[in-house]
Image: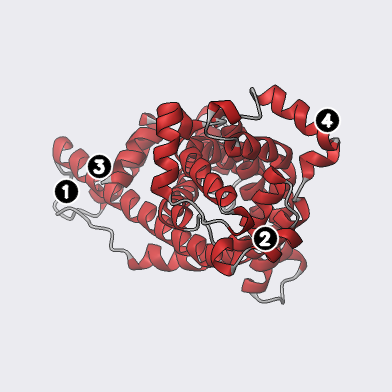
Amino acid sequence: TVSVLYWRAWTPHSFRMSTTIVAGERASSSNHRGQPSPGNGEATAQLATAASVSATFAADFFSSWIGYVTALSVAHPMDTVRVRWQTRGMTPAETLRSDSLRGLYSGIVGPAVANGPLVACIFAMNETYRACARWINVHCLGNSHLAFAKHFTVGELAFAGGAAGASASVFMCPVSVVRIQQQIGGMHGCRSPSMLEVCKGLYHAEGVAGFYRALPYEAMASGVGRMAYFTSYEVTKASLETALPTVNDTARMVLAASLTSVVGWASCFPMDVIKNRLQADAISHSKKEYRGFAHCCAVTYRNGGVRAFWTGFSLTILRSCVSSGISLPVYDTLKPRLRAAIPKATPS
């Protein structure tokens, strides 16, 4: 049901209708009794299209969720070290000396339970936006030669990735704020605050707005980052397939995912640093360090120069290479299998 509503909300009406018409033509040509009545044919085609979209969305959703959780279980400690380095100046060595393994996994429940489905939605939204971009390319821009092209163009990939990342930031922002508050709250061996404690503190001090700290910068970082991430992954995969035809598919996917990590993070890292600092700022108004985006940028530059905007980049790339090297190949491997396994209900 959610996937059908998502399809209707995010896909242009004319694109849905063109898909329905194609489905109706196929259903009509296969009917040995002749042409169905217009009303029944349209209703049948719409139901068949909705069922197909639902199954495809579900397959993409669960494939990416499984890939994300698998990667998270390995990469989360590195993310905790990165956040503390960026926001509180604790070097990786200081964090590792002062924290237990449990402390390094502070805040993992939120991403696994909340971010998992959201990241899965980003992947599924990315697939849907690609279809929308292709339809626009063919029907609005007159590029009819792309109608049956096997691969998406770089422009289509960039549009889909950026739109998916920016759209999802509305849901990702509250999870990011709570996760970062948990991660910095567990510094120096202190007990990490629970999700409920952080949520209560934020709501008491700032109301609902507290969960949307730095939302515009979350959208910018996520949009630009996902645009570079998804585009570079597909382009790199295609290039490696041509350059290394004898190499195992999984090995090529892992290599492409690792290279993608560098491109994706390099495109948005300074914005991510500022976004993290704003979201990590004290909950209490009397203890806040930053007055806004410009002030945060000025303080960051004054304290560390240009290098401060790249604090933790090497660790982030290491973590992302591990994470993407697991999640993207798992997603690419599971997606066609789940699409084939999930039944597409056809109305009688």
Q: Earlier in the sequence, mark 1 or mark 3?
A: 1
**Residue identified by numbered label 4:** 302
Front position among marks 1 and 2: 2
Question: Residue 46 got which mark?
Answer: 3
Reading the chain from its start, which is encountered first: label 1 or label 2? 1
Residue located 51% across and 67% down the image: 70
Badge 1: how crowded within 10 Å, few (<14), some, or many (20+)?
A: few
Q: Amino acid at mark 2?
A: Arg
* Placement of 333 over or under 55, stated as above or below: below
Check residue 34 in the rendering and tell me which mark sits there, or answer none.
1
Mark 4: which amino acid? Arg
Precedes in sequence: disc 3 or disc 4? 3
SS of the residue under disc 4: helix
For label 3, the crowd category at 10 Å Cα-Cα, with few meaning under 14, some 14 to 19 and many 20 or more, is: many
Residue 150 seen in render = yes
Question: Are the residues flagged by discs 4 and 2 in contact, CB closer than 8 Å?
Answer: no
| Residue at 36 percent of width and 30 percent of height | 13
Could you tell me residue 87's position as x and y percent?
68, 43
What percent of the width, then of the height, locates residue 37?
14, 39
Q: Nearer the viewer, mark 4 or mark 1?
A: 4
From the image, state whether disc 1 or disc 3 is nearer to you.
Answer: 3
Q: Nearer the viewer, residue 128 or 241?
A: 128
User: Looking at numbered disc 3 in the image, what kind of residue is underneath it?
Assistant: Gln
Looking at the rendered structure, the secondary structure element under dot 3 is: helix
Name which residue lies at 18% across and 53% down: 347
Q: Earlier in the sequence, mark 2 or mark 3?
A: 3
Amino acid on which disc 1 is placed = Gly
Return the residue nearer the eye: 229 or 314.
Answer: 314
Labels 4 and 2: the sequence-earlier one: 4
CA separation, marks 2 and 3?
A: 44 Å
